[in-house]
Image (cartoon, grey):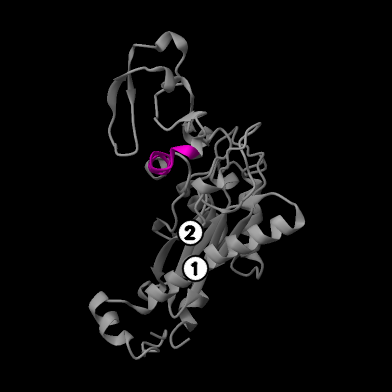
Amino acid sequence: MHLSGRSICSSDPQFVEEKGIRAEDLVIGALESAFQECDEVIGRELEASGQVGGCTALVAVSLQGKLYVANAGDSRAILVRKDEVRPLSSEFTPETERQRIQQLAFVYPELLAGEFTRLEFPRRLKGDDLGQKVLFRDHHMRGWSYKCVEKSDLKYPLIHGQGRQARLLGTLAVSRGLGDHQLRVLDTNIQLKPFLLAVPQVTVLDVDQLELQEEDVVVMATDGLWDVLSNEQVARLVRSFLPGNREDSHRFSELAQMLIHSTQGKDDGLTEEGQVSYDDISVFVIPLHSQGQRSSGH
């Protein structure tokens, strides 16, 4: 099926109709495939150059009146309007993907090399806990249950820590992203890549269905911004800045700079005192008004 709706392969029409495949499903599939292919290219280039490294990825594509937001990692995109704040992505961390990661360790226990336990406990267990009853969660559980502590439970947890401090195999704070093909747990040969997904979650925003105003924007930023500011705080800063700078042709990039300054103790009293980020931060502020005006037929 072409984006215009016509069929490309003669065998497709019946299947497309039965499955209810739409044009946007092809865009989603293209983004998912692009992330996977990009990850494979990065892997080959890192191997050829002898380098190591990885990153998260957040992508927005405006096409045929819709905005597609693809996210693999802990960056975030939100829609900010006069009376609405709408998340356009979800973060992927060891905590949010606990069950998927534990399931993988259950199916392939050799990935842990006998050094880690896949079970989650409220705290790191010690020798004194042997034989005691403690709460735990496994891959098949959303709730909690009790078990008696065994010697194998004293191993380092597959996922340890809470919130922003949660780490996968004591190393990574994210569970999706690109690269890191050669990354190993410190002083071991245990690879992290099997637990990392390059596939993004794709959110679709139907821009044509919105009555867009001049100050309607999408804010995309890396985790350093969201460590300090909530969605609502960012929205408040957007709404306080844009109306008073309508004549400034650079106001959206200036707003992005102002958001970054707000995380470094350089704000104008619009955020809470003491909020400082020491992370590197990238911020994009994308106006939607012009997109909505010219999206039809393109």
**Amino acid type, residue under disc 1 in the picture:** Ser
Q: Residue at x 70, y 55 (%)?
A: 47
Nearer to me, 85 or 119: 119
Q: Is residue 161 magenta?
A: no
Mark 1 neighbour class, 10 Å CA radius: few under 14, some 14 to 19, many 20 or more: some
Q: Position of residue 120 (x, y in %)?
A: 40, 29
Q: Is residue 108 magenta?
A: yes
* Location of mark 1 (residue): 33
| Chief secondary structure of the magenta portion | helix
Tell me which numbered mark, 1 or 2, is placed earlier along the sequence.
1
Helix, strand or loop status at disc 2 = loop
- Checking the image for residue 168, the label placed there is none
Where, by quadrant of the figure, is residue 100 drawn? top left
Q: Position of residue 96 (x, y in %)?
A: 42, 43
Q: Is residue 45 left or right of residue 66?
A: right
Q: Position of residue 176 (x, y in %)?
A: 51, 51
Work out whether residue 216 can be spotted.
no
* Location of mark 2 (residue): 199
Q: Residue at x 32, y 87 (%)?
A: 11
Q: Which residues are magenta?
A: 101-110
Q: Is residue 81 left or right of residue 209?
A: right
Q: Residue at x 43, y 70 (%)?
A: 29
In this view, the residue farthest toward the top is 128
Look at the picture and state if 56 lies above or below 228: below
Where, by quadrant of the figure, is residue 121 drawn? top left
Q: Considering the image in quadrants, where does the N terminus appear?
A: bottom left
Mark 2 neighbour class, 10 Å CA radius: few under 14, some 14 to 19, many 20 or more: many
Q: Is residue 128 left or right of residue 184?
A: left
Nearer to me, 161 or 113: 113
Work out whether residue 289 can be spotted.
yes
Look at the picture and state if 281 lies above or below 4: above
In this view, the residue farthest toward the right is 49
